[in-house]
C-alpha cells in the first residue's frame, strides 16, 4: 500500500512539475500601434498590430491598418467615403545585439474602399490586394516595451467597381519610401 501511495504521489508531482515547465515555454506575443506619414497638419495615418511567436525567431503578424472616413461638402455636391485595410504575414527575426533585432518576411494585405458622390449620384467600390516584403528593426527597452521602424515595399493589384459604367482595373508597383514607426507591448 505504501508503494502505491509513493507512486501516485510521484506521478502527481511529475505532472505538476512538467506542466509548469511547459507553461514557461508559452509563445511570446506583441501588440502595438504603428504610425506613418507623421506631420502636424492632421494628415496622419495609424494602425495596430498583433504578433505571436510560432517558434524560435519566427512570428505571425496581423496588422489592422487604420480605416479612413472622408467627406467633402460643397454647395450642391457632397462626397463621402470609407476605407479599411488589413494585412497578415510572417516575419523572421535575427538578433543584432542584446536589444536590437532585424526582422523580415512576406506580407499580404487587402484594402476595401467605398465612395459616393451626390452630384453624379454614383458610387464606387474598390478592392485592392497587395503583396509586400517587410524590412524592419526592433529595439527592446526592457522585457515589456519595444519600439520599431519598418518599411514594406510591394506590388498591388486592384479593381474599381462603379455603380454605373465599366469595371476599371488598377495595377500599381509601389516601391515607396514609406516608413512605419511603431510602439510594441510584449506579453
Image (cartoon, rainbow, N blue to C red):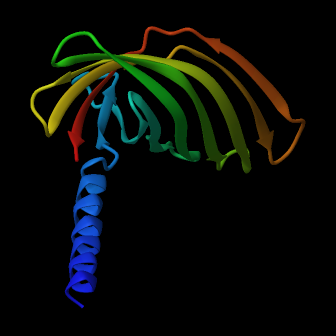
State the image coordinates of residue 156 (x, y, percent, origin top left): 67, 22
State the image coordinates of residue 51 (x, y, percent, origin top left): 38, 40
State the image coordinates of residue 170 (x, y, percent, origin top left): 76, 23
Q: Residue at x 21, y 26 (%)?
A: 147
Q: Is residue 108 left or right of residue 27?
A: right
As displayed, is residue 99 above or below residue 59? above
Residue occupying the far right of the picture: 166
Quarter of the rendering containing residue 14: bottom left
Which of these two is toward me, 137 or 72?
137
Q: Quick one: quadrant of the N terminus?
A: bottom left
As displayed, is residue 126 above or below residue 150? below
Which of these two is toward me, 76 or 54?
54
Q: Is residue 139 left or right of residue 154?
A: left
Q: How many marks?
A: 0
State the image coordinates of residue 23 (x, y, percent, origin top left): 27, 56
As displayed, is residue 64 above or below residue 2? above
Residue occupying the far bottom of the picture: 1
Q: Residue at x 43, y 34 (%)?
A: 59
Residue 163 visible (yes or no): yes
Which of these two is toward me, 67 or 82?
67
Which of these two is toward me, 96 or 9?
9
Residue 44 visible (yes or no): no
Quarter of the rendering containing residue 146: top left
Q: Is residue 15 left or right of residue 53?
A: left
Q: Is residue 13 left or right of residue 179?
A: left
Q: Residue at x 59, y 16 (%)?
A: 154
As displayed, is residue 139 above or below residue 53? above
Amino acid at each position: 500500500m505504501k508503494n502505491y501511495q509513493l507512486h501516485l504521489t510521484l506521478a502527481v508531482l511529475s505532472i505538476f512539475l512538467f506542466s509548469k515547465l511547459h507553461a514557461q515555454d508559452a509563445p511570446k506575443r506583441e501588440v502595438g500601434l504603428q504610425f506613418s506619414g507623421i506631420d502636424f497638419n492632421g494628415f496622419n495615418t495609424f494602425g495596430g498590430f498583433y504578433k505571436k511567436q510560432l517558434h524560435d525567431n519566427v512570428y505571425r503578424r496581423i496588422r489592422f491598418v487604420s480605416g479612413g472616413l472622408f467627406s467633402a461638402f460643397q454647395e450642391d455636391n457632397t462626397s463621402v467615403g470609407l476605407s479599411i485595410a488589413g494585412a497578415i504575414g510572417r516575419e523572421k527575426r535575427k538578433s543584432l545585439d542584446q536589444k536590437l533585432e532585424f526582422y523580415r518576411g512576406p506580407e499580404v494585405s487587402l484594402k476595401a474602399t467605398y465612395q459616393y458622390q451626390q452630384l453624379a449620384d454614383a458610387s464606387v467600390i474598390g478592392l485592392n490586394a497587395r503583396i509586400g516584403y517587410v524590412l524592419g528593426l526592433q529595439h527592446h527597452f526592457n522585457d515589456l516595451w519595444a519600439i520599431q521602424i519598418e518599411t514594406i515595399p510591394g506590388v498591388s493589384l486592384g479593381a474599381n467597381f462603379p455603380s454605373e459604367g465599366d469595371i476599371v482595373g488598377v495595377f500599381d508597383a509601389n516601391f515607396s519610401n514609406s516608413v512605419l514607426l511603431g510602439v510594441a507591448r510584449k506579453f
